[in-house]
Image (cartoon, helix red, strand yellow):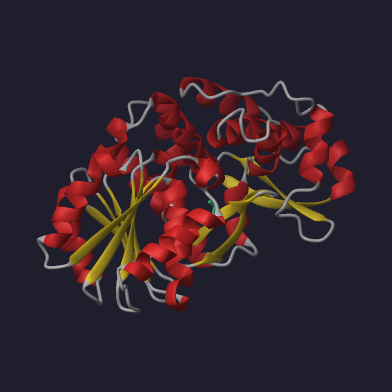
């Protein structure tokens, strides 16, 4: 078991280790200020780990309640968050009680959002069970849900009180989910750690170690820029075009990780053409993506993707903060006007 502390206000620990889930109650009871814990989980995860977490919490003397919602991104809605809030109120959770988010990114984001607004803010604890959630979304306090106009358009920054990462939970994930999460892990190597990228290239991953390294990378960005106005934006490498690809297919085509994989290749090729990225980087990214069964090119038309990307939700006024890497492990923010995007991306598809 290894521990990292995220130094924001207040600081919190991320604990990483195989087999942690069975003893989650003890770890959680150390940070609980009240007596009631509401486990929020989806219909895929609750049957796998719900009872184990509940009895581990009960054996620490806590009053435990469970709220289960229907799994899937299509349920990442204000209505689902509303149901979580109603559940918290119906069980009489007070300001010192806590919500326990058990599941993937959809669960963690919404349970965190519910914790951010219930009684104007109560504690929540993340127990992520997917690669994306364990390597990225459970740490850093971005919470929220989708609106009909797009993904994650409503939300709040609300840091968890504790994050418990047990890589054993990944054994129950379908193969596509694992590859999907690998895209974010590859991204972390590309933007911040040549060493992690080498480990990924070599293969046969020790997930305890890989996840610990990922959380450490995420930690450095969150500590430097908790509210995502500068340094943290580098975590969006591959996301401007990745998001455009997801949106082009109305979020029913490639998964998020698959779209980010293709977006990273486009960004690397554009950077190489502009003389901003070391030659050969895109080729190296493509071979590692293939190794993890991730796509390297999209069939969606370039002009349509560029139109969508020009309207990116993360645009600031007319400026797009397009993330590039100069070399493996070194990201930087390249500011572009929306009208310059098309020229910049010529030849990157
Ligand atoms: N997943 C990107 C961030 O937390 O900023």
Q: Quadrant of residue 36?
A: bottom left
* Residue 95, image quadrant: bottom left
Q: Residue at horizontal 58%, vertical 23%?
A: 295
Q: Residue at x 72, y 52 (%)?
A: 313
Q: Measuring 71% from the left and 38% from the top, which residue is drawn there?
A: 244
Please count the marks in the image.
0
Comparing 204 with 170, the one in front is 170
Rendering coords of residue 70 (x, y %): 42, 43
Dividing the picture into quarters, in which one does residue 348 lie? top right
Name the residue nearer the viewer: 259 or 285. 259
Q: Tell me the residue at 31%/35% (across/down).
A: 170
The correct choice, above or below, for 202 with respect to 127 in the image is above
Q: Is residue 172 above or below residue 73?
A: above
Residue 2 x, y percent position in the rendering = 24, 53
* Residue 79 located left or right of residue 159: right
- Residue 104 placement, left or right of 54: right
Relative depth, front residue between 283 and 166: 166
In this view of the protein, can residue 230 be seen by the observer?
Answer: yes
Is residue 140 in sight in this rendering?
no
Q: Is residue 323 left or right of residue 65?
A: right
Return the x and y of residue 123 as percentages of the image width and height. Answer: 36, 70
- The correct choice, above or below, for 36 with respect to 17 in the image is below
């Amino acid at each position: 078991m290894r521990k990292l502390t995220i130094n924001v206000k207040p600081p919190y620990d991320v604990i990483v280790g195989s087999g942690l889930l069975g003893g989650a109650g003890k770890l959680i009871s150390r940070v609980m200020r009240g007596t009631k814990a509401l486990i929020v989980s989806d219909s895929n995860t609750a049957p796998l780990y719900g009872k184990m977490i509940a009895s581990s919490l009960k054996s620490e003397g806590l009053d435990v309640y469970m709220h289960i919602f229907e799994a899937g991104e299509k349920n990442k809605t204000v209505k689902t968050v509303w149901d979580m809030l109603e559940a918290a109120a119906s069980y009489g959770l007070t300001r010192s009680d806590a919500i326990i988010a058990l599941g993937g990114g959809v669960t963690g984001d919404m349970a965190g959002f519910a914790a951010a607004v219930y009684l104007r803010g109560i504690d929540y604890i993340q127990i992520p069970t997917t690669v994306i959630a364990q390597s990225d979304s459970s740490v850093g306090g971005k919470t929220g849900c989708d609106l009909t106009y797009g993904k994650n358009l409503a939300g709040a920054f609300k840091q968890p009180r504790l994050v418990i990462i047990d890589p054993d939970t990944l054994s129950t994930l379908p193969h596509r989910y694992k590859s999907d999460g690998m895209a974010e892990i590859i991204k972390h190597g590309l933007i911040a750690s040549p060493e992690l990228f080498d480990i990924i290239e070599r293969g046969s991953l020790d997930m305890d170690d890989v996840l610990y390294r990922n959380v450490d990378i995420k930690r450095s960005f969150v500590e430097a820029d908790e509210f995502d106005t500068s340094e943290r934006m580098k975590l969006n490498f591959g996301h401007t075009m990745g998001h455009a690809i997801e949106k082009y297919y109305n979020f029913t085509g490639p998964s998020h990780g698959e779209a980010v994989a293709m977006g990273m290749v486009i960004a690397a090729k554009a950077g190489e053409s502009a003389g901003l990225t070391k030659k050969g980087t895109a080729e190296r990214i493509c071979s590692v993506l293939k190794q993890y069964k991730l796509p390297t090119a999209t069939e969606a038309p370039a002009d349509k993707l560029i139109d969508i990307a020009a309207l990116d939700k993360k645009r600031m006024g007319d400026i797009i903060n397009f993330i590039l890497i100069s070399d493996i492990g070194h990201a930087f923010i390249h500011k572009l006007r929306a009208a310059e995007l098309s020229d910049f991306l010529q030849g990157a598809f």
